[in-house]
Image (cartoon, helix red, strand yellow):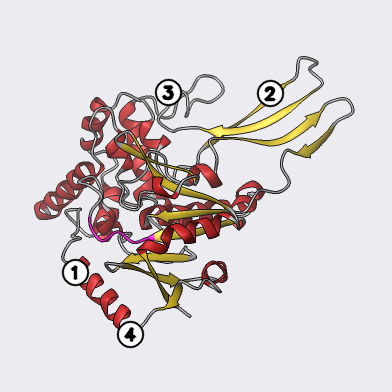
């Protein structure tokens, strides 16, 4: 069975069924925003939501985590955690699933990160396909992440009174197998899915002023662009953009010693390239002194460097960086300003 269907009225039962198998995290409303939180009451689940304040990254790459415990005399170490619990991320947007795929690439690269892999291997992903824009900040169509591109176990698509479930893994199969109210999708339901997908094509349009190959070329050639000066003048170095990004993975490692100074715990904690001291080295040299240089670095970490290294863009189009920016810096506007400058430069030649 590759495609199944479930009535919307049965979603609550299904969620309660999944709670018996693993811890379930769902999108919930928090004031005028949304967050991923553990499932307690199915009535709190929001299936139509703008991207959550923090991406689900916080569950597989937590903001602060213990790496190991150590003793100095005699010296020995031990892993802080050996195993993590099974958990399900429910109703994840395709842009955030793309973010998980990016993190997989990074942390599975040699040397592999055991903490990340341990958590990731315990995770089941149930996505939900967006059929309309979250808001004006999203650039998911230009990034190609408005449609499912793998990386999930189940994908939910709204076809009216029911959801079609695309089963994409053995884990996904395990969550629908033997559940009486989840049926194999009929021909009529698959025809409805096709109509929904056709209608969606009229909704999503390219948000960038040029296709991605041209955007990459602009980043390749416009390192010294005045665009970065303008972005730097706006930036207040709050670090919000990197804190909410689903593909930012910089971290610092520090040791917390007990009062005895003989034992302690090693932690890792999120860090940000937007912080003033991030690029400082011994001797006080700072490789990115200005906010313009730090912002430029952030953009290059999405549109240039990972393409060169991994052949993948690390911007997912979720819009969080723009949505959370205290000074109104827009990713779409910045990218389009570079694309326009590139177009003028090509005309001039």
Characterize the local packing of mark 1: few (<14), some (14-19) or many (20 or more) Cα atoms within 10 angstroms. Answer: few
Q: Which residue is mark 1?
A: 199
Above or below residue 280? Residue 36 is below
Is tag 2's residue or tag 1's residue first in the polypeptide sequence?
A: 1
Q: CA distance from mark 1 to mark 3?
A: 47 Å
Q: Secondary structure at mark 2?
A: strand
Q: CA distance from mark 1 to mark 4?
A: 19 Å
Q: Secondary structure at mark 4?
A: helix
Of residues 286 and 262, the one drawn nearer to the viewer in this rendering: 262
Q: Residue at x 50, y 32 (%)?
A: 271
Is tag 1's residue or tag 4's residue first in the polypeptide sequence?
A: 4
Q: CA distance from mark 2 to mark 4?
A: 60 Å
Characterize the local packing of mark 4: few (<14), some (14-19) or many (20 or more) Cα atoms within 10 angstroms. Answer: few
Of residues 60 and 219, the one drawn nearer to the viewer in this rendering: 60
Quarter of the image with the C terminus is bottom left
Of residues 108 and 306, the one drawn nearer to the viewer in this rendering: 108
Q: Residue furthest top?
A: 259
Marker disc for residue 187: 4
Is tag 3's residue or tag 2's residue first in the polypeptide sequence?
A: 2
The residue stretch that appears in magenta = 128-132
Q: Which residue is mark 3?
A: 276
Residue 129 falls inside the magenta stretch:
yes
- Whether tag 2 and tag 4 are in contact, CB under 8 A, the answer is no
Q: Which residue is mark 2?
A: 256
Residue 54 falls inside the magenta stretch:
no
Is tag 1's residue or tag 3's residue first in the polypeptide sequence?
A: 1
Total tally of numbered discs in the picture: 4
The quarter holding residue 320 reads top left
Dot in front, 3 or 2: 2
Image spot of residue 103 (x, y percent)? 50, 51
- Whether tag 1 and tag 4 are in contact, CB under 8 A, the answer is no
């Amino acid at each position: 069975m590759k495609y199944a269907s479930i009535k919307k009225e049965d979603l609550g039962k299904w969620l309660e069924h999944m709670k018996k198998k693993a811890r379930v995290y769902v999108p919930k409303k928090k004031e005028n925003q949304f967050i991923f939180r553990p499932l307690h009451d199915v009535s709190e689940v929001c299936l139509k939501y703008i991207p959550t304040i923090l991406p689900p990254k916080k569950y597989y790459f937590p903001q602060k985590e213990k790496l190991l415990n150590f003793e100095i005399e005699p010296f020995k170490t031990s892993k802080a955690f050996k195993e993590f619990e099974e958990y399900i991320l429910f109703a994840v947007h395709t842009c955030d699933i793309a973010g998980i795929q990016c993190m997989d690439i990074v942390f599975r690269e040699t040397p592999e990160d055991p903490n990340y892999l341990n958590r990731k291997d315990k995770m089941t992903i149930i996505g939900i396909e967006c059929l309309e824009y979250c808001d004006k900040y999203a650039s998911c169509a230009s990034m190609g992440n408005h449609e499912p591109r793998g990386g999930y176990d189940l994908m939910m698509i709204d076809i009216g009174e029911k959801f079609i479930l695309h089963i994409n893994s053995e884990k996904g199969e395990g969550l629908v197998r033997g559940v009486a109210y989840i049926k194999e999708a009929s021909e009529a339901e698959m025809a409805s899915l096709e109509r929904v997908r056709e209608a969606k094509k009229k909704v999503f349009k390219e948000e960038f002023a040029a296709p991605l190959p041209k955007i990459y070329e602009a980043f390749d050639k416009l390192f010294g662009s005045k665009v970065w000066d303008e972005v730097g003048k706006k930036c207040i170095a709050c670090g919000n953009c990197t804190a909410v990004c689903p593909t930012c993975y910089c971290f610092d490692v520090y040791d917390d010693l007990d009062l005895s100074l003989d034992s302690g715990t090693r932690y890792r904690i999120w860090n940000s390239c937007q912080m003033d001291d991030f690029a400082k080295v011994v001797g006080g040299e700072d490789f990115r002194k200005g906010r313009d240089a730090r912002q430029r670095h952030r953009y290059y970490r999405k549109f240039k460097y990972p393409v060169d290294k991994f052949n993948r863009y690390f911007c997912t189009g979720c819009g969080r960086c723009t949505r959370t920016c205290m000074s109104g810096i827009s990713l779409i506007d910045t990218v389009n300003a570079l694309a326009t400058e590139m177009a003028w430069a090509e005309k001039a030649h």
